[in-house]
Image (cartoon, rainbow, N blue to C red):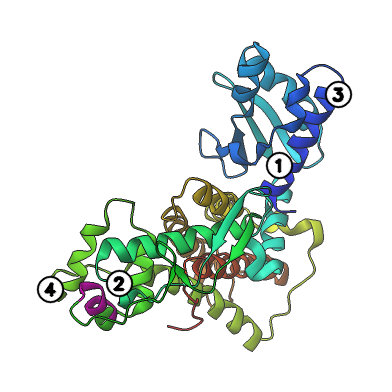
């Protein structure tokens, strides 16, 4: 169960059923809820809010909060939903059970690199291009545009868009990329920092801010590499799994009991964050804001480091180390999910995750 995908499916079914019996306008059955999700007020890890009632209100004439209350009834009856209720002036907040949240992490771990995929953008179209040779860009704005265009297409593809794959760059027509210009500031930065570091910085830069990357061409002005924290977190999660294998820690099959062992605030915060990956990918593609994905990965990396300290998976983790095989197994599932999410997210920026630093 990947939470955001299941919420999409159940809310769509709810809209169709309520439209069929006349409690909602007929057009409601054609609404796509996938683009309406956001973090719920209060920051509760297993709470998800949707603005779908506002869209319905524009067609129906009723107040959004009244429509949200109608939707809450069938959704609140689902076995894996703890509560569904209107909040504020019309948001519908759905709180899933901790069992559902934990199961979502287990599915993401099992999915590996496919954990970022969804059908949120099904029915839309996108172009997928080869990753650009950034060192061939004549300027930082050009390098940013090349990276942003390519990354947005890859994000849309992961979110279910129908894609056209090109084998050559299009810049006013098919053409050949220019040769590398050693005088280019981008070439100098790639030569000094490496292609992955430069690509990641471009990926996380907002539109219009590419000129700020000029500092990368000046060694004395260079700042800490934001990619390092993400790669370190991925390598650390992968290392946790390797250590567990070396120690012959066999994972117990916890089934529906996984959530019983993931109870610390740090674990719950991380689980809630992991569940958003497919939605963040689709939203970044839809909004043409590829920078949202690297910044999300940085949130996951920081949450993993906090979780590792508060709830280590390995027996030499100090006083918080697991004292029973089931607890170690549950925490290893979290490490595996973090590894999968960070690797999938980095791949969508054009960067290969590394297992060792």
77 in relation to 121, above or below: above
Mark seen at residue 20:
3
Image position of 338 (left or right of 101): left
Number of numbered labels in the structure image: 4
Give the magenta part as a residue range. 184-190
4 or 2: tag closer to the N-terminus? 2
Residue where numbered disc 2 is placed: 137
Residue where numbered disc 1 is placed: 8
Question: In front here: 206 or 316?
Answer: 206
1 or 4: tag closer to the N-terminus? 1
4 or 3: tag closer to the N-terminus? 3
State the SS at label 4.
helix
State the SS at label 1.
helix
Q: Which residue is drawn at 70% across and 32% down?
A: 31
Residue 345, percent across and down?
52, 64
Residue 210, percent across and down?
27, 58
Image position of 337 (left or right of 294): right
Q: Do the residues labelled 4 and 2 touch (CB within 8 Å)?
A: no
1 or 2: tag closer to the N-terminus? 1
State the SS at label 3.
helix
Q: Which residue is drawn at 55% across and 52% down?
A: 273
């Amino acid at each position: 169960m990947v939470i955001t995908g299941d919420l999409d499916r159940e809310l769509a079914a709810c809209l169709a059923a309520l439209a069929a019996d006349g409690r909602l306008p007929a057009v409601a059955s054609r609404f796509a809820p996938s683009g309406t999700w956001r973090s719920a007020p209060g920051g509760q890890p297993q709470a998800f809010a949707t603005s779908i009632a506002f869209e319905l209100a524009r067609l129906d004439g009723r107040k959004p909060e009244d429509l949200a209350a109608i939707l809450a009834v069938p959704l609140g009856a689902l076995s894996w939903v703890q509560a569904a209720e209107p909040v504020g002036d019309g948001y519908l907040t759905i709180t899933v059970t901790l069992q559902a949240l934990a199961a979502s992490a287990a599915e993401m771990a099992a999915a590996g690199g496919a954990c970022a995929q969804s059908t949120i953008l099904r029915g839309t179209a996108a172009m997928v291009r080869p990753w650009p040779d950034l060192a061939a860009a004549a300027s930082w704005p050009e390098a940013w545009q090349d990276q942003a265009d390519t990354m947005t297409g890859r994000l849309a593809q992961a979110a279910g868009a129908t894609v056209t794959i090109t084998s050559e760059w299009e810049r006013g027509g098919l053409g050949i990329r220019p040769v590398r210009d050693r005088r280019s500031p981008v070439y100098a930065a790639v030569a000094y920092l490496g292609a992955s570091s430069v690509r990641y910085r471009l990926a996380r830069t907002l539109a219009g801010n590419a000129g700020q990357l000029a500092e990368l061409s000046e060694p004395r002005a260079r700042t800490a590499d934001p990619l390092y924290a993400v790669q370190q977190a991925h390598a650390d999660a992968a290392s946790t799994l390797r250590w567990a294998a070396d120690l012959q820690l066999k994972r117990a099959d916890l089934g529906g009991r996984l959530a019983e062992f993931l109870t610390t605030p740090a674990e719950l915060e991380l689980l809630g964050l992991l569940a958003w990956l497919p939605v963040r990918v689709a939203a970044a593609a839809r909004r043409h804001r590829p920078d949202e994905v690297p910044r999300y990965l940085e949130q996951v990396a920081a949450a993993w480091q906090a979780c590792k300290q508060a709830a280590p998976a390995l027996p030499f983790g100090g006083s918080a180390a697991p004292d029973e095989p089931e607890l170690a197994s549950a925490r290893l599932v979290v490490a595996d999910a973090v590894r999968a999410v960070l690797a999938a997210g980095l791949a969508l920026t054009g960067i290969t995750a590394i297992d060792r630093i």
